[in-house]
Image: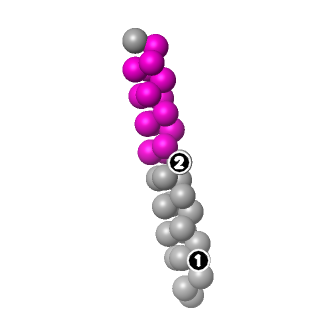
Amino acid sequence: RDKDRDKERTLILAVTTTHRIDFKLSYSLNNTIP
């Protein structure tokens, strides 16, 4: 069960990180265009 929990946590962490990167990318893109 601990292994499953670790896997779940890693998955959530990966999704959150990807989402944050996408947000930063779109944010900087929006700020670059006047």
Please report the bounds of the magenta region as a residue range: 2-16
Task: Using the image, determine if residue 19 lies above or below residue 25.
Answer: above
Give the residue number, with chain letter if any, for mark 1: 31
Q: Main secondary structure of the magenta part?
A: helix
The numbered disc on residue 8 is none
Q: Position of residue 33 (x, y in %)?
A: 55, 85
Asked which quadrant contains residue 28, the reply is bottom right
- Does the magenta portion include 12? yes
Q: Quick one: label 1, few (<14), some, or many (20+) residues within 10 Å?
A: few
- At a point 54% along the width and 76% down the height, the residue shown is 29
- Amino acid type of disc 2? Thr
- Amino acid type of disc 1? Asn
Image marks 2 and 1: residues in contact by CB distance under 8 Å: no
- At a point 47% along the width and 29% down the height, the residue shown is 9
Q: Position of residue 15 (x, y in %)?
A: 44, 45
Q: Quick one: label 2, few (<14), some, or many (20+) residues within 10 Å?
A: few
Q: Earlier in the sequence, mark 2 or mark 1?
A: 2
- At a point 54% along the width and 58% down the height, the residue shown is 21
Task: Using the image, determine if residue 22 lies above or below residue 28.
Answer: above
Q: Position of residue 30 (x, y in %)?
A: 52, 76
Give the residue number, with chain letter if any, for mark 2: 17
Of the pair 8 and 26, the residue shown nearer to us? 8
Of the pair 25 and 1, the residue shown nearer to us? 1
Local secondary structure at mark 1: helix
Local secondary structure at mark 2: helix
Instruction: Return the residue found at the far front.
Output: 3
Question: Could you give the CA–CA distance between mark 2 and mark 1, rounded to whole angstroms?
Answer: 21 Å
Which mark's residue is nearer the viewer, 2 or 1?
2
Q: Position of residue 11 (x, y in %)?
A: 43, 36
Asked which quadrant contains residue 1, the reply is top left
- Which quarter of the image is occupied by the C terminus? bottom right
